[in-house]
């Protein structure tokens, strides 16, 4: 039997013959519906000679526990306990096998969340089970974190083949009883990693940090109120943190932890730390009182200042993109009147302006991130009429510089595109029109300066174009570049004046 099952695995996961794969999938369905399914899965796990054999067993178990007619409670408990013992005794299994087995544990836990045996909610002791892993080797600790991360994702996942009301009951119960403890546990382990001398060459230590940061991100991305928010609506996102999490967010050490992780970890990991900070910056306003919110914002701004004063990490495109999202979220969730009274505001707005100008000048680097920077400035300028604070917002100083940097950098791109054959950023008309609509708001701050700049550029380019046309030695390349300058200047007019 074992030999037949391993042939099935080879056909299913490695086969290139479509007919063989279809036949293998058919046999897999028959195996799941077979009374011998559990014994054959155990045979594959215990005696299989390849990782694919173990993966097939995990796949069968996953489908078995998710069947519409659930297995008896005791049988599900036995499967869960068997898998926990199995991965605890084999921490060096292939990562995709561990992930597949962890998914089975998560599905069993979710589907049995309200199941009672002898007056006990028997599937809710998952934290106690995981703590045994966390007290073991680094490999065991990683497996424990993977279980918590997969469970958090599974609890947040809507299976439309099942009643949505049951999903919400389970998701809310998990949120109220378990999720906060998981977040605190993850933060505690991250503090332990940061407290030790970081060996960036230690792959195990890096893997543990990656899984912990992903776990925190899964906690902060949880659908707390059942809104099933559209992730594409990035600029509208507010994280509806539960009220009983206030104490975690009020501790300055929480934000400091993730800023410290950003500065201490290599780029692949520091990007995840920034992703967590994006969610922290998006925390709902009503979680705090006014003084608490001001203090929390002050800590965020202090972190922004620290990043911009040590900008080496922002040369990584992933870090750069997440930092731009972070800046945009700050203005989404805080009013300009709140920002201007922060102690470090004058220095930070200067640093952000410098960062934005540099970003616009290097238009070929991570162009998708510019949207977030322009969103920040658009919303800052749009808020000026509503600011009641006597503190200067300084936008009349920096907004014209942002406008100038955008226009001149796009003019400079014309020459580079034509001479070096680069992709023309202006070919993406949807993005260009979106950016110009954002820029038209920014340009209205000290609008006279914007008008003067456009008039000067148009007149200068028109004169240069006329000279080229009248020249005895007509240079077709120079004429094409000059025509590009004029077209781009004309394109800016309707948006800057709309």
Image (cartoon, rainbow, N blue to C red):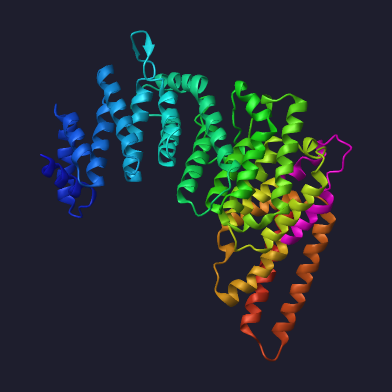
Instruction: Give the residue furthest to the right.
Output: 390
Instruction: Give the residue furthest to the top.
Output: 119
On the image, which quarter does residue 2 sit in? top left
Name the residue: 75% across, 43% down: 380
Is residue 435 visible in the rendered image? The answer is yes
Seen from the viewer's position, the closer of residues 64 and 211 is 211
Seen from the viewer's position, the closer of residues 447 and 380 is 380
Seen from the viewer's position, the closer of residues 461 and 130 is 130
Which quadrant would the N terminus be assigned to in this image? top left
Name the residue: 72% across, 48% down: 306
Instruction: Give the residue furthest to the bottom.
Output: 472
Image position, residue 262 (x, y; %): 61, 47
Residue 380 magenta-highlighted: yes
Name the residue: 68% across, 75% down: 482
Residue 434 magenta-highlighted: no
Q: Is residue 444 above or below residue 294?
A: below
Image position, residue 413 (x, y; %): 64, 68
Image position, residue 159 (x, y; %): 37, 29
Is residue 443 visible in the rendered image? The answer is no
Magenta residues span 378-405
On the image, which quarter does residue 408 sit in? bottom right
On the image, which quarter does residue 473 sit in? bottom right
Instruction: Look at the magenta stretch and give its main secondary structure.
Output: helix
Numbered disc total? 0
Name the residue: 56% across, 53% down: 267
In screen coordinates, is 285 left or right of 71? right
């Amino acid at each position: 039997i074992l030999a037949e099952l391993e042939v099935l695995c080879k056909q299913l996961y490695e086969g290139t013959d479509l007919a063989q794969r279809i036949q293998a999938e058919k046999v897999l369905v028959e195996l799941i519906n077979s009374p011998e399914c559990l014994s054959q899965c155990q045979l594959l796990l215990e005696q299989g000679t390849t990782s694919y054999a173990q993966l097939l067993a995990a796949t069968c178990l996953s489908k078995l526990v998710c069947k519409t007619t659930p297995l008896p409670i005791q049988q599900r408990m036995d499967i869960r306990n068997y898998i926990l013992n199995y991965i605890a005794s084999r921490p060096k299994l292939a990562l995709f096998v561990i992930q597949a087995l962890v998914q089975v544990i998560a599905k069993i836990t979710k589907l049995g969340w309200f199941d009672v045996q002898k007056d006990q909610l028997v599937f809710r002791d998952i934290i106690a089970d995981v703590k045994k892993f966390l007290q073991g080797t680094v490999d065991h600790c990683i497996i424990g974190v993977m279980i918590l991360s997969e469970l958090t994702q599974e609890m947040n996942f809507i299976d439309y083949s099942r009643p949505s009301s049951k999903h919400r009951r389970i998701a809310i119960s998990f949120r109220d009883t378990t999720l906060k403890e998981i977040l605190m546990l993850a933060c505690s382990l991250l503090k332990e990693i940061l407290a030790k001398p970081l060996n960036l060459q230690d792959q195990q230590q890096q893997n543990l940090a990656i899984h912990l940061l992903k776990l925190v991100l899964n906690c902060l991305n949880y659908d707390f109120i059942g809104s099933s928010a559209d992730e594409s609506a990035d600029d509208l996102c507010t994280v509806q943190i539960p009220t009983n999490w206030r104490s975690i967010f009020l501790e300055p050490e929480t934000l400091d932890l993730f800023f410290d992780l950003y500065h201490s970890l290599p780029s692949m990991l520091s990007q995840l730390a920034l992703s967590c900070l994006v969610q922290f910056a998006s925390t709902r306003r009503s979680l705090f009182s006014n003084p608490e919110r001001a203090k929390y914002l002050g800590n965020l701004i202090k972190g922004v200042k620290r990043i911009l004063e040590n900008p080496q990490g922002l040369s990584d495109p992933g870090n750069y993109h997440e930092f731009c999202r972070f800046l945009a979220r700050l203005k989404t969730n805080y009013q300009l009147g709140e920002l201007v009274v922060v102690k470090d505001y004058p220095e930070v707005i200067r640093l952000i302006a410098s960062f934005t100008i540099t970003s616009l000048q290097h238009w070929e680097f991570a162009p998708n991130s510019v949207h977030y920077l322009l969103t920040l400035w658009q919303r800052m300028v749009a808020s000026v009429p509503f600011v009641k604070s006597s503190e200067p917002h300084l936008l009349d100083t920096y907004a014209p510089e942002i406008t100038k940097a955008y226009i001149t950098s796009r003019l400079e791109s014309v020459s580079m595109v034509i001479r070096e054959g680069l992709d023309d950023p202006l070919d993406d008309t949807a993005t260009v029109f979106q950016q110009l609509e954002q820029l038209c708001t920014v340009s209205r701050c000290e609008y006279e300066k914007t008008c003067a700049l456009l008039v000067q550029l148009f007149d200068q380019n028109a004169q240069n174009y006329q000279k080229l046309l009248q020249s005895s030695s007509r240079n077709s390349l120079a004429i094409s570049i000059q025509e590009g300058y004029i077209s781009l200047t004309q394109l800016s007019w309707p948006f800057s004046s709309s």
